[in-house]
Amino acid sequence: MSYKLFQSLPSPGSPELGIVVADQAYRLPECTLEAYLADVGVQHERMKELARRIADGDERPEAIDLGTTRLVAPTLNAATIYACGANYSDHLEAMAKAMNTVANDPRAGGASPFFFMIPGRTGLAGHGEHIDYPRGVQKLDFEAELAVIIGRRARDVSEADALSYVAGYSCANDLSVRERLIRHHEDASSPFRIDWLGSKVFPKSCPVGPFLTPSEFIADPENLAIKTWVNDELRQDSNTKNHIYSISEQIAFLSSRFDLWPGDVLITGTPAGVGAENGRFISAGDRVRIDIAGLGTLVTEIA
């Protein structure tokens, strides 16, 4: 029986785990996401059985209304977020057009996937959270991304085995301060001119959610429709089949350098349609809605 997991935040208290079965959400106060991720194989089978019992009416946990429940990201607060840059072919083509350059395929030159890091304690935010517009900023951008949540320690993982290390999938919004990317006081030839930390890391810069959808229930993560609306205007409309480097390739590459830990998150690139391509950025008061097929809809309110 299929299910999705979420984390809610009672007031006061620590995050509580919940489960969605047949579009109804339930509290699981005796369970934690940390325990689930510590032994995903066993816990996943347990949750499938619980979902079946709920669907059959044999188990009756407390039902809750997600519309009135504060959600937090469906991963661990201490997670590291590994963000794959320039990983959609349509995005590369759109950026090349905007910059009047040629869209080069990084694979053709033998390049490895490119990543930057976001600390979870700083960047993570949940579905429906209000994100403060950074002070002094004019070019705040959105980026819809497929989030991959690691389910067991991964080191030197092969591409063939990589997806077996995935606990599940979610939606992410990689918010970006575009004018902080370039350190203009540095010479154009300087290796210190690009500032990924300044552009990508600020409080709640990476909303993730609303659910963790177990990997068993996503037949092909490389073929999922991904869309973004800003104030109900469709801005991004693509598919994860436009990934340049697959999820398996990303996991294999990262795990060849260091350990990936349960709860760590890979955000796997964004498709065409972001403000950096056309100058249409987001403002305070905007509502960003990201939908990925089978995973749900992540809403971010810009305060």
Image (cartoon, rainbow, N blue to C red):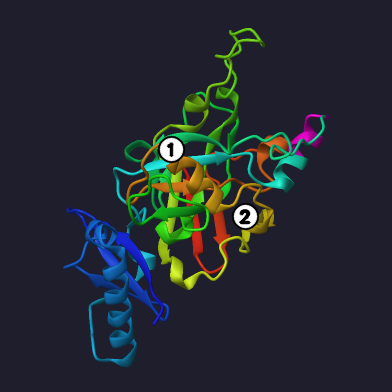
Q: Circle 1 — which element?
A: loop
On the question of residue 257 being in view, the answer is yes
Kind of residue at badge 1 = Asp
The answer to whether 35 is drawn above or below residue 175 in the figure is: below
> Which residue position holds label 2?
229
Above or below — where is 52 with respect to 247?
below
Q: Earlier in the sequence, mark 1 or mark 2?
A: 1
Which residue shows up at 40% across the image and 50% down it? 129
Q: Residue at x 54, y 27 (%)?
A: 137
Magenta stretch mostly in which secondary structure? helix
Q: Is residue 29 left or right of residue 88?
A: left
Which callout, 1 or 2, points to the residue nearer the camera?
Answer: 2
Q: Specify whether 244 is left or right of 211.
A: right
The reply to whether residue 166 is visible in this rendering is: no
Between residue 211 and residue 244, name the one nearer to us.
244
Q: Nearer the viewer, residue 204 or 165?
A: 165
Q: Which residues are magenta?
A: 94-100
Residue at mark 1 to residue at mark 2: CA–CA distance: 19 Å
